[in-house]
Amino acid sequence: MTHGVDLRVRFGAVELANPVLTASGTSGYGQELAGLTSLSALGGLVTKGISPRPRAGNSTPRICEAAAGMINSIGLENVGVDGFARDKLPFLRGCGTRVIVNFFGETEDEYVECAAALCAAARAAGGGVDALEMNISCPNVKKGGVEFGTDPGVAGDLVRACRAVCDRPLWVKLTPNITDIVALARAVVDAGADGLSMINTVSAMAIDARARRPRIATVFGGLSGPAIKPIALRMVYQVARAGLGVPICGIGGVASGTDAAEFLVAGASAVQVGTQTFVEPGAAARVARELEAFCVAERLGSAAELVGTLRL
């Protein structure tokens, strides 16, 4: 607490020093940012997505700029569970902030395997993982490549299976590429999700008109950044209004303290900073300072007082 403002927030069972975290896939495994910003100034760090085995990711080009953000199709490149436990977890145990490990699979069995292995690694290391964040925006290879997160029933079954093997708080990251976001949120909460992260990237593409070619090798990618903030705010508000009883972490175009405040007013308890980190590695820490200044200007005693205060 500084300037009379208490930035601490509770996100289910996890207490955060402030409501601002990094977003998965935008700051590696944390060590990449350590020399560029103070990790202890963050409410939390969300790691790059981890799968049961290492992945090389997609072919290039796999990232391009958009008018108000970027499109990426990295392909979830990562070191795998064993590599994470051996090479990344020791640093994370002493990084000075909460650690949320994002994970995924291509089948239900892979999701369950990954969740169980990450929890086991954390137990063996004596800590270093405060929560897991499930990325359900992945193609289900046994169901024709359709995203797990576009079918509430499938998503609910997947969360239920992972919840059964997970001894850490389980957050679920929701895809926006669905008609009814509230139905999806309700399904994963009913299945045992302890928190919701929303939203993941919006399906998009970019074209080089002179070359008559897509700018991304896989043709489609995920749009992130300020371009999707209005969509993310709408979805956070819709889910918060549904009163599902779990906290929400707002994601999508957060680049300032005012952006963060908007998500809290919409009903989120915390936010994640992603795309802005690519041009400004210290963005999340700055957003936290600006949110504090916003609370001072609004004469609030705590950041939590903003949550769900939208006036209609």
Image (cartoon, rainbow, N blue to C red):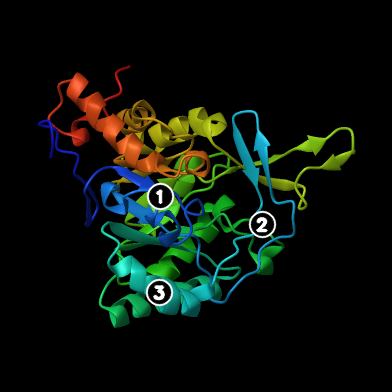
Q: Which mark is residue 146?
A: 2
Contact (Cβ within 8 Å) of mark 1 with mark 2: no
Q: Quadrant of residue 54?
A: bottom right
Q: Which mark is residue 152?
A: none
Kindly identify the residue that appears in the image at 24 percent across and 53 percent down.
12
- Toward the left, the furthest residue is 4
Q: Which mark is residue 118?
A: 3
Q: Residue 275: x and y, percent?
A: 52, 41
Is tag 3's residue or tag 1's residue first in the polypeptide sequence? 1
For the residue carrying disc 1, how many other residues have a C-alpha within 10 Å: few (<14), some (14-19), or many (20+)?
few
Q: In 3D space, how far apart are the residues under numbered discs 3 and 1 (Cα atoms)?
A: 27 Å
Q: Residue 197: x and y, percent?
A: 41, 48
| Camera-side mark, 1 or 2 | 1
Contact (Cβ within 8 Å) of mark 3 with mark 1: no
Callout 3: SS: helix
The answer to whether 16 is drawn above or below residue 238 in the figure is below
Kindly identify the residue that appears in the image at 32 percent across and 34 percent down.
267
Query: Disc 1 designates what residue?
Result: 36
